[in-house]
Amino acid sequence: MDFELSDEQRLIQQTAREFAEAEVAPHAAAFDQRAEFPYEIVSKMAELGLMGLPIPEEFGGAGADTISYALAVEELARADASVAITMAAHVSLGTMPFLLFGTSEQKEKYIPSLASGERLWAFGLTEPNAGSDAGATQTRASLGDGTWVVNGTKSFITNSGTRLTAGVTVTAVTGPSSNGHAEVSNLIIPAETEGFTVAKDYHKMGWRASDTHELAFQDARVPEENLLGERGKGFRQFLTILDGGRISIAALSVGLAQACLDASVKYARERTQFGKPIGSFEGIQFKIAEMATRIEHARLMTYKAAWLKDKGKDFAMAAGMAKLFSSRIATLAADEAVQIHGGYGVMEEYPVARYWRDVKIGEIGEGTSEIQKLVIARMLDL
């Protein structure tokens, strides 16, 4: 068992870390306060190749492995979760479906501009009444005369309303299936599609500098060839997409947790009480030691899931476990970081207040913690 990163992986990790420290961290608080999408940072990430990091070179990506991708997401999240989720959602949810399920024509048409970071793409699964119960999808698409007509609403869709957004892939009921359940398919909806409306951005507690919108489709018409993958296979396709996406959310959570640890160690060295740095007291030392141990556990689980994926092995359970554990550890780390900072921990002048607001979404997005437990239990034949 070899825990050593390759030279290429270390280079990607170092590049992402230096970029995050120099270009992301200094501006994170300001973007968060203004709830402003960081266009310039995204442009610079594109120049570095981060927006297409795991996409094959033949489509304009960097051709990196999943471990490298997880390392980059982790380093970005250490500086700002909003920037990290912008990259992760674009890659795992926006671009990967084309790579996994697209026709050769669709891959050639869409992937190069997405892998380069020139354009962003979104994935529309969640609806007002269909979140954890994805099978309750109410968006409908009917096919006639070579055209899909789409009607419905999608909620909480990342990267769906920026000026870089080229479109969204949505799940829709396209008819009844042979087993009596709804037939769900994935459809490609370009941003300029008539009848496709992007609502105002949400006012969010966390990830405030990321782009999140509700989307509406009212007789939105797209060509028949905008079907992504096989008709009726949409449910299975998005489960596959989410399995990979959970690795990136786990990595994001590890990065956020590490940021909490970094801030706690720094504060414990600087803050004095009773004439001593508070880091000299066992009560603080034990909190930080426990935090560091949990984070290392979460990191190893995340890397293992990424390694399994790179080896072509079944990684679904490992990804679910990594996402479940890492997101919980990030929440615990943020709680402890705020506690260590005391009254200053609830002041927005200190980054731990932002970390505390950001971590909770990790336990909800891309499958809630409760859904992760259900998925894991089913894989254990329960």
Image (cartoon, grey):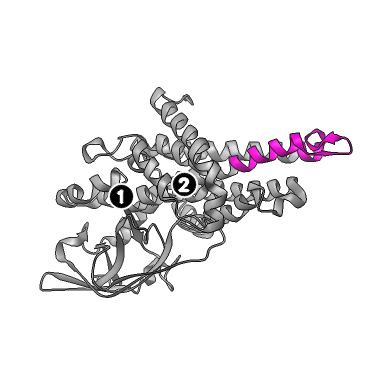
Horizontally, residue 182 falls left or right of residue 155, namely left
Q: Where's residue 97, x and y in %?
A: 29, 52
Q: Is residue 245 magenta?
A: no
Q: Is residue 269 magenta?
A: yes
The answer to whether mark 1 and mark 2 are in CB contact below 8 A is no
Quadrant in the rendering for residue 247? top left
Viewer-nearest residue: 43 or 120:
43
Q: Where's residue 191, x and y in %?
A: 27, 63
Mark 1–mark 2 distance (CA, rounded to whole Å): 15 Å
Viewer-nearest residue: 286 or 52:
52
- Residue corresponding to mark 2: 84
- For the point 53% across and 59% down, the residue is 370
Viewer-nearest residue: 263 or 244:
263
- Residue corresponding to mark 1: 95
Magenta segment range?
A: 258-285
Per the picture, the main secondary structure of the magenta-coloured stretch is helix
Nearer-N-terminus badge (1/2): 2
- For the point 35% across and 47% down, the residue is 91
The amino acid at mark 2 is: Ala
Above or below: residue 186 compared with residue 197: above
Would you call the spot at circle 2 few (<14 residues within 10 Å), some (14-19), or many (20 or more)?
many
Q: Where's residue 123, x and y in %?
A: 34, 58
The amino acid at mark 1 is: Thr
